[in-house]
Amino acid sequence: MQIIVNLDVMMAVRKVSSKELAKAIDITEANLSLLKRGKVKGVRFETLANICAYLNCQPGDILEFRGQAE
């Protein structure tokens, strides 16, 4: 099971560049890139809320759970 990060998809739908989003939510482009690639261990709720506010979306539009049903 894993969490899939669909941030790049939502950014493409909204036509927002990494540079624009990073500046708007006050994080580095490098950290945004790590988040987009799912290479982070966690994300602060404040950061997630800022992303959702800027992209006008819900957390479920960005994060997806894929796992086995038990």
Image: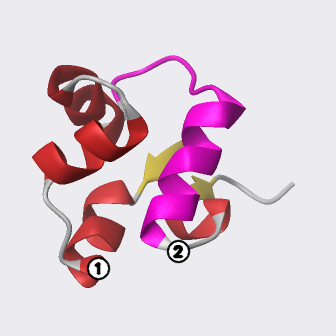
Give how far across and how far down residue 65 sits, in percent. 63, 55
Q: Amino acid at mark 1?
A: Arg
Residue 1 got which mark? none
Answer whether labels 2 and 1 touch (C-beta < 8 Å).
yes
Residue at image point 26% right, 59% down: 8
Residue at image point 42% right, 21% down: 40
Total residue callouts: 2
**Residue under circle 1?**
14
Residue nearer the viewer, 12 or 21: 21
Query: Dominant secondary structure of the magenta stretch?
Result: helix
Give how far across and how far down residue 34 sits, in percent. 26, 27
Classify residue 48 by image quadrant.
top right
Residue nearer the viewer, 26 or 29: 26
**Residue under circle 2?**
56
The numbered mark, 2 or 1, whose residue comes first in the sequence reads 1
Q: Is residue 2 visible?
A: no
Residue at image point 33% right, 24% down: 39
Q: If the image is split into quadrants, where does the N terminus sit?
A: top right
Residue 7 covered by magenta stretch: no
Q: If the image is split into quadrants, where does the C terminus sit?
A: bottom right
Give how far across and how far down residue 56 sits, in percent. 53, 74
Classify residue 11 by image quadrant.
bottom left
Give how far across and how far down residue 16 sits, in percent. 20, 67
- Residue 50, compared with residue 53, is above or below; it is above
Q: Is residue 31 visible?
A: yes
Specify the segment rendered in magenta.
Answer: 39-55
- Residue 67, compared with residue 48, is above or below; it is below
Q: Amino acid at mark 2?
A: Asn
Residue nearer the viewer, 65 or 61: 61
Residue at image point 18% right, 77% down: 15
Identify the secondary structure beneath mark 1.
helix
Residue nearer the viewer, 38 or 31: 31
